[in-house]
Every structure is written in structure tokens, then in C-alpha cells.
Image (cartoon, rainbow, N blue to C red):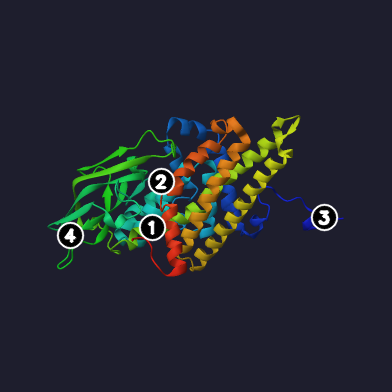
Amino acid sequence: MKASPAARRADPLDFLDIGSTLTPDERLVRDTVRAFVAERVLPHIAGWFDEGRFPRELIPELGELGLLGMHLEGYGCTGASAVSYGLACLELEAADSGLRSFVSVQGSLAMYAIYAFGSEEQRQHWLPRMARGAAIGCFGLTEWDFGSDPAGMRTTARRSGSDYILNGSKAWITNGGFADVAIVWARTDPEDGKRSGAIRGFLVPKGSKGFRTNDIGRKLSLRASVTSELVFEDVRLPAEAILPNVTGLRGPLACLSEARYGIVWGALGAARTCYETALEYAKTRIQFEKPIASFQLTQAKLVNMLLELQKGQLVALQLGRMKDAGTLAPEHVSFGKLNNVREALAICREARTILGASGITLEYPIIRHMNNLESVLTYEGTSEIHTLILGEAITGIAAYKA
């Protein structure tokens, strides 16, 4: 007699059978990226993290898999669905947040900025190479003194004839130290009658005179990722370097919303790895002559992890379906980023307690994911900022300033 669905043992990694709701194409993306990660990343990632090295040798392979700018149409991009892109982010971050961060910055920040706001000439020049991984981009918005309030940026682009002269600096820039082009947001000259100029985006190629980068070291988070400062000292740029199709913060904030969407999924990858690690450890770790998985308190921890992991996956999937339908708003992305990163970090911390002292070594992935998620929690919008975005959405009252 064939067992009914209710009689089958639930999958502890997909208790609600969310995978059954995916299309064949979405499952193919998920399985392809998972296999790539298992073969090319997992055997080495603890060492890369320990060394503080991003594996640049993987970039062409990421391009061959179509993961760079995969949700964009044309220019060598695969035009994948939002859900497929999210699943790829989840599987990449199941290995390490640094790998997913590279893909997010390349595709959702740098490439998307050119795709959405660049000229056709800029798109043709940069996007096909970036999709292959032959050119790398970074995204310069945050400054040392202006993170949550980018409108206060001090980086300026002053007109000089038909050119612009760029001065200032950007901080905490992923990929900055080896990028071939930086998307830099700067304040231009004030127009007549205005106290300050408009914020515009500029394409700054590597090697431009007066442009240098300084990698930020001594990190205890995102160690398998390059984080840099960008410095601009009288960098002369032609007018063709400006992104012509956007003015103001609308441009960079739209790019951030694209990247935050990937984080909604990616954080769950880190959480899944930590939950899976804790589950397997609990079934084999013997204390008081039996596995600790048999103890009520340990089971309670594992169940709470499972609940939040599956709820987060449902949130991500719903946001992905909304994005594919064209109904996703930035506040929806804030909902997902706030909830999923917060719960992912809680899952990782709880998983660490099950492993005890073993959980703090790189023999297991948990402390690495915990440290990485401390950065994910605050980059591309802190929890406080996303809370205020949601507060404004439900009350109609902005509470950003007193």
C-alpha cells in the first residue's frame, strides 16, 4: 500500500516541502549552484576565511554559470526569474556570505546601475564583460561618516569645462580593491538658487589618475571578501562617465533594493548550513550515554531553528513571486531583510550552543557564518533603518529625523 503524503517522514531541511512549489527551471538553478558550491567552494572556504582571501579564481566559473547579473535581460545576462536569482543567492551564502556578496555587488549593484541608469554605449561597453566575469565592478555610496544617511555625502563632482573633477572617499566597498570600474555617487555643483547640488552616478575606471583604493584589513567578519576604501583626489572624468538616466538618491536606493532582495534569500543559506550542522552534530554527540538530540532542551532548540528557517523561506519565496509579478515595493524588501537576517543570526547563535566549544572553531562552519552575518545585519540598511521604513509604511509617518 502506497503511503499517503501525511504518512511520509518530513524532510528536516524542508519540512513544509517548499521545494515542491518551485518550477523545473528554478530547481535546476538551485541544484546547479548547490553542486558547484559543494565541489568548488566547501572544501576550501574555511581556509580562505582563515587566510582572509577572496577566491578570485572562481570568478570566471561564476560567469560561465550565468550567475553574474543573472536577473538582467540581454548583454550576455541570462534573464533568470527573481526566484531563481534568490535561490542562487541562498546556495552561495550556504557556503559563505563573502561569495554571495561578490555576486550581489557585481550583479545587483554595479551591473544593475549601468543597466537601469546608464547609456546604451555604457551598457554595451561594460555589461557583457561583467556578465562573463572579465570585468569586475564595485559600488561606492557609503562614506566613513555617512552610511544610513547617504544624502549627507561629502564626495563631490565639480564641473570643469565639459569634464567633472571628483574628490572625496567611499568606505566599506565590497570588491573595491580589484574592481575594474567603480560606480560612484557624488554631489554635483549647486544649480542656480539651490543650496546643494544633485547626486549623480559616475563610472570611474580602474587606473584613473587620482583614484586609489585601500583594502580594509583586520576584519573578523566577511574575511573571504575584499572590503576597501575608495579615494578620489582630483579625478578628471569626461561627461560620458556620468550615468545619464537618473538624478538624486533614487538611483542608488533602487540599486540597494535589488541587492537587499538577494540578502533576503542569502541569509537563509547561512542559517540552513548552521541548522543542518547542529542537527547532525546533535545526533552523533554522546553525553550521559545517549545522543544530545534525545534531550528535550536540544530538541526545542532544533525545532525553533526549523520554524524560523522555514518561515523565512516562505517570506523569501513570496517576495520573489511578487518581484516576478512586478508588485514588489522597497518596503517589502525591508520586511524580508529585517526578518530574515535577524532570524538567520539567531539560528546560527543557537546552533553554536549545540556544538559547545566545537562551535567556535573553523572545523565547523557555524562561527564563520555567525561572524559574517554580523556584517550582513548592518550593511545595505541596518535593522534600525529597515524598522523605520516599515514603521513609515504602516503609519504613514516618517521617523528618520526628530
Q: Which residue is mark 4?
A: 189
- Dot placed on the residue nearer the N-terminal end, 1 or 4: 4
Q: Nearer the viewer, residue 374 or 57?
A: 374
For label 2, count other residues whose C-alpha is less than 10 Å away and answer few (under 14), some (14-19) or many (20+).
many
Q: Quadrant of the C terminus?
A: bottom left
**Which percent across, then down, holds residue 248?**
29, 62
Horizontal placement of 204 versus 365: left or right?
Answer: left
Q: CA distance from mark 4 to mark 2?
A: 35 Å
Residue depth check, mark 3 versus mark 4: number of the one nearer the observer = 4
How far apart marks 3 and 4 lie (CA) works out to 72 Å
Separation (CA) of disc 3 from disc 1: 48 Å
Q: Are the residues flagged by discs 1 and 2 in contact, CB closer than 8 Å?
A: no
The answer to whether the residue labelled 3 contacts the one labelled 4, judged by CB atoms less than 8 Å apart, is: no
Q: Which residue is mark 3?
A: 3
Mark toward the start of the polypeptide (3 vs 4): 3
Which element is circle 4 on? loop
In the picture, residue 34 is in which quadrant?
top right
Q: Amino acid at mark 2?
A: Gly
- In the image, taking residue 233 as reference, residue 374 lies left or right, namely right
Q: Amino acid at mark 4?
A: Asp
For label 1, the residue is 255
Query: Few, some or many C-alpha atoms within 10 Å of disc 4 (few <14, some 14-19, many ≥20)?
Result: some
**Mark positioned earlier in the residue sequence (3 or 1):** 3
* Residue named by callout 2: 133
Please tell me which residue is depicted at 54% across the width and 32% down the height of the picture.
Answer: 360
Task: Say which amino acid is labelled 3.
Answer: Ala
Question: For the point 54% across and 58% down, which residue is it?
Answer: 83
Asked whether residue 180 is in view, the answer is no
List x then y, in percent, for residue 232. Answer: 22, 45
Q: Is residue 280 above or below residue 327?
A: above
